[in-house]
Image (cartoon, helix red, strand yellow):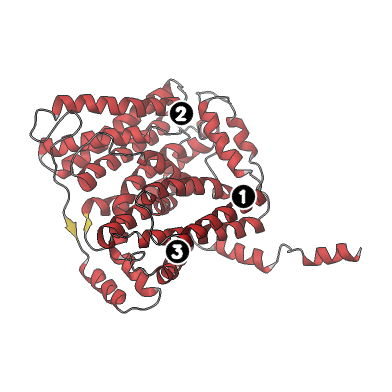
Amino acid sequence: MSSVTDIQHTTPGPDSPRQDLATALKALPAWARWSGAATLGVLVLTLVQMVSDTSLLTDEGTSRAMVRWAIPILLAGLGGLFSERAGVVNIGLEGMMILGTWFGAWGALQWDSPWAGLLAGLIGGALGGLLHAIATVTFGVDQIVSGVAINILAPGLTRYMAERVFSGRPGGSVSQSPRVDGFDKFTVPGIANLLGWIRDGDIFLISDGAGLLRGLVAGVSLFTLLALLCVPFSAWLLMRTRVGLRIRICGENPTAGESLGINVFRHKYLAVVISGAFAGLAGAYIVLELAGLYRGGQTTGRGFIALAALIFGNWRALGVLAGAMLFSYPFGLALVDFDSEGSGVATRGLLLVIAIGLFATAVGLGRSTRNARRPELDAADTGSPTGSYVRMLQSLGTTENGRLSLLAAGLGLISLIWYLATDAAPTWLPNTMPYVLVLLVLVFAAQRLRPPKAVGIPFRKGDH
């Protein structure tokens, strides 16, 4: 009996300090939690930078390149946010981005203006979203099947249109367009100068944070600023407006929404078309800002990474932004690392960063209790591909924490050994690392996922 009593006294109760701390953190507003996480991330980068003999992990050039690579993922992720909040899985983001690339180049060439390309890319992606909405909402086609069909259709359609439109122009061919003009760059004078002064002050952590922030306010294009402003706009539209509330009801409980007089079909259509429009903007950004021309295959799977950013962000706009930045950081660092130093020393430091993150994940999972199964997701078990998508999220959320903790510790040890055994990262590592991060996030962040309850579940008028 004494041993049982001892165990009861040593088991953390509901008012234990650890649970009090967790409750206090959850009570903080979202901006405070994300700011704290960003500060912790900068601290890790600073410490790794010190032991790795490099200064590029927190260089403003790295953050500027990261943002440039993150914007297409961010825009496509916001598109997925609207669609899935309305209960429609949009695997076709990649295809809608491809439509945005062609229409963006065509609009910029047709009217000799990047703003025309921006608008044309938005319309091209929205047309892809409309096609997805017609197939899934009106005709009840399986959402995964419809998305895959759009991903197959878009490359062939854009290649045909490129052959008809671009091949007769100087610099154009069946697979690419002539070069197009991008947007002007600007620098915020006061803030950029202040951050530069703080960066040059060589203050631990603060100077590194200022260097990263300066990359966000110096040499930034108007398109980038517009894309970043889409984050608070999307959060406001979904969370603070009547239309946003109705879209979210369509993704949580469309039957209840219909009983309250909400036109579920109309709001699903609206959300999916908005989703395609955001994906089209992402494609136009690739043409107007990253490449300077349309070229077949230039989306390189960013639409699927955007879905991972959406899941990582727990179906919230600010979370999608964080996921896009996380997945794009290796690309941005590699561009600066291999172009300036040419050694891969800075990119090697990411192995240590990943090791630290995995060890922290192992500790966190080891202390947590087993996640409960969400019974509302069982309703999605329809035997269809869409049901398989939802069941994947369900199975990830109910995996044994102890095994995940051991897996995280083992992967962290491998990353640490790799870091210690090499002096520089290979050139192929930066291109591989974002996809590895996607897999790690899907496995280890699934414990806190909360997808919309009715996502992927077909709805018909009068369903009860």
- Considering depth in this image, is 321 or 432 the residue closer to the camera? 432
The quarter in which the N terminus is drawn is bottom right
- Considering depth in this image, is 406 or 70 the residue closer to the camera? 406
Q: Which residue is mark 1?
A: 404
Instruction: Name the spot of residue 201 as percent of width and height, x first.
Output: 31, 79
Q: Helix or strand or loop: what does disc 3 sit on?
A: helix
Q: Which residue is mark 2?
A: 144
Q: Judge depth for marks 3 and 1 and give the one in front.
A: 1
On residue 41, which mark appears? Answer: 3
Q: Helix or strand or loop: what does disc 2 sit on?
A: helix
Q: Earlier in the sequence, mark 3 or mark 1?
A: 3
* Quadrant in the picture for residue 168: top left
What is the distance, in whole Å, between disc 2 and disc 1 at their CAs? 28 Å
Instruction: Name the spot of residue 411 as percent of width and height, x first.
Output: 55, 53
Q: Amino acid at mark 2?
A: Ile
Q: Is residue 302 above or below residue 329?
A: above
Q: Amino acid at mark 1?
A: Leu
Instruction: Name the spot of residue 84 as percent of width and height, x first.
Output: 45, 38
In the picture provided, is 427 more to the left or to the right than 383? left
In the picture provided, is 455 more to the left or to the right than 2? left
Neighbour tally class for label 3: few under 14, some 14-19, many 20 plus, Cα within 10 Å? some
